[in-house]
Amino acid sequence: MEDYGRFLVLLVSALLVGFVSVIFSLVWVFHYREGLSWDGSVREFNWHPVLIITGFVFIQGIAIIVYRLPWTWKCSKVLMKFIHAGLHTIAMILAIVSMVAVFEYHNAGNIPNMYSLHSWIGLTAVIFYSLQLFLGFAVFLLPFAPVSLRTAVMPIHVYSGLTIFAMVIATALMGITEKLIFSLRSNPAYSESPPEATLVNCLGVLLVIFGMFILWMASRPYWKRPPEENAKALLTTGGTPEGTEAESTMTDGGNADKSDLRINSEAARKQNLKLDEAGQRSTM
């Protein structure tokens, strides 16, 4: 990997900043906002910022760069796709639970739903994220989509994934600011910079830094998963390179002779390289 040392520094920094962000969110709700519960009170609402920061920001960020971790390049691409999809699924579940907590809290307190810009963009991000996850499963994880469709969809998949991630961080910043304005109206007021406001403002800065780290690592072309490593690992096991499942003509591996395996592997390797040139192996 080119600039492996710099990548490692960025990765460790991103993990540290993301982890500290989660800790800050827990300190906020337990020290200043009465803790966590599921009883329709403000303690149920507190699940919203904790789960959003933990799942929709931190775990989603890790899912975005999981292909870039160099020590995973010898792993099967299929395995990495399952890990990538699994992390995104966990993030999606946590985001949905956090939204349920907000709606239940609002309904219990007769508070209107979906009136703020934060709620509009937040719901839009969840909907787009759900569509992104569904299309990712259908096109890239299941073996039914043709290679031409995967090649065409991949740039859109990459761009929309990074856009949604940036949208989530922007929405989180709006949400924590909105919560501070509503909660700190007097004694002390938000404008007086009480300790809670300072803590949450620092949390917002950490979220921005975490997003910058993730987007930078995900957008550097020289840190993407190289096709050579994947091709070698697959050829040694007699498998078919990722993205070429539809190209395989083998219906019974146990009955195929060695010459057929060599021909099929060579054809798959060439197709794999074409996909890489077309952008198939970008950041996901």
Image: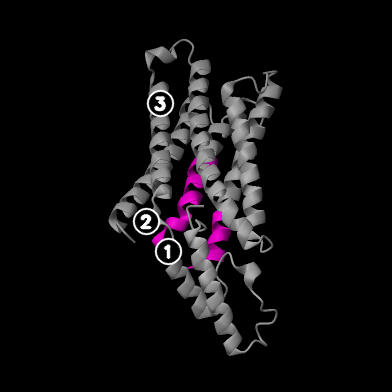
Label 3–label 2 contact, CB within 8 A: no
Q: Nearer the viewer, mark 3 or mark 2?
A: 2
Left/right of residue 53 with respect to residue 8 in the rendered view: right
The residue at the point 55 percent across, 64 percent down is: 79
- x, y percentage for residue 91? 57, 45
Q: Nearer the viewer, residue 119 or 184?
A: 119
- Magenta residues, as a range? 55-84
Q: Quadrant of the N terminus?
A: bottom left
Q: Main secondary structure of the magenta part?
A: helix
| Residue 36 seen in the figure | no
Q: Report which quarter residue 192 is drawn in.
A: top left
Q: Nearer the viewer, residue 137 or 240?
A: 240
- The image shows residue 21, relative to residue 247, as above or below, that is above
- The image shows residue 192, relative to residue 128, as above or below, that is above
Which residue position is annotated with label 2? 222
| Residue 94 seen in the figure | yes
Rounded to the nearest whole Å, what is the CA distance between mark 3 and mark 2?
Answer: 34 Å
- x, y percentage for residue 278? 50, 57
Three-letter amino acid code at disc 2? Tyr
